[in-house]
Image (spheres, rainbow, N blue to C red):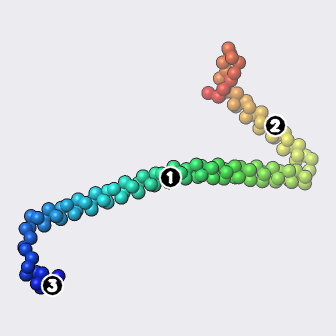
Amino acid sequence: MVLSDIKNSKPKNIMENNETNQDDVKNTMDSLSETFKSAADEAKSKAKEAAPKVKEALKNAAHDVAYGAAYGASFAGALAAEFLPQSIKDGLDEGSDAGKSAAKNTADKYKTCDSSEGECSAS
């Protein structure tokens, strides 16, 4: 602004200036609110899009962990069995059978049977 512009300009009414500022603030707040709403909608959309991929990755990871644990236990047991004396192998077999029997008996205590259908289920 040059000096001649200042001399030729009309003084602004304070109320007019205040109303203009309020309109500017309102417009800015409305724009900010709309931006947040738009960002939230986009985030929800992206999350819905990504959820199946994440679920599949977790399922595959659980499978791989279970596979690794079973493989490791089976391999270690089979390898150890090749080097153990027969008396220890017999003890392991007997202990395994006793453990399975105890687990079955314990599970049977908690099952309920429907005599009309002959089906049992855990209670």
Give the Cα distance between marks 1 and 3: 55 Å
Which mark is on residue 47? Answer: 1
Q: Amino acid at mark 2?
A: Asp
Q: For this rendering, which residue is in front, 106 or 5?
A: 5
Q: How many marks?
A: 3
Which mark is on residue 2? Answer: 3
Q: What residue is drawn where x is 53% and y is 51%? A: 49
Query: Is 106 rendered above or below residue 29?
Result: above
Which mark is on residue 97? Answer: 2
Q: Earlier in the sequence, mark 2 or mark 3?
A: 3
Q: Position of residue 68 (x, y in %)?
A: 74, 53
From the viewer's perspective, is the residue at label 2 or at label 1 nearer? 1
Classify residue 97 by image quadrant.
top right
Q: Is residue 24 left or right of residue 91?
A: left
Q: Earlier in the sequence, mark 1 or mark 3?
A: 3
The secondary structure type at the circle numbered 3 is: loop
Q: Earlier in the sequence, mark 2 or mark 1?
A: 1
Q: Position of residue 5 (x, y in %)?
A: 12, 81
Name the quarter where the C terminus is drawn. Answer: top right
Q: For this rendering, which residue is in front, 102 or 40?
A: 40
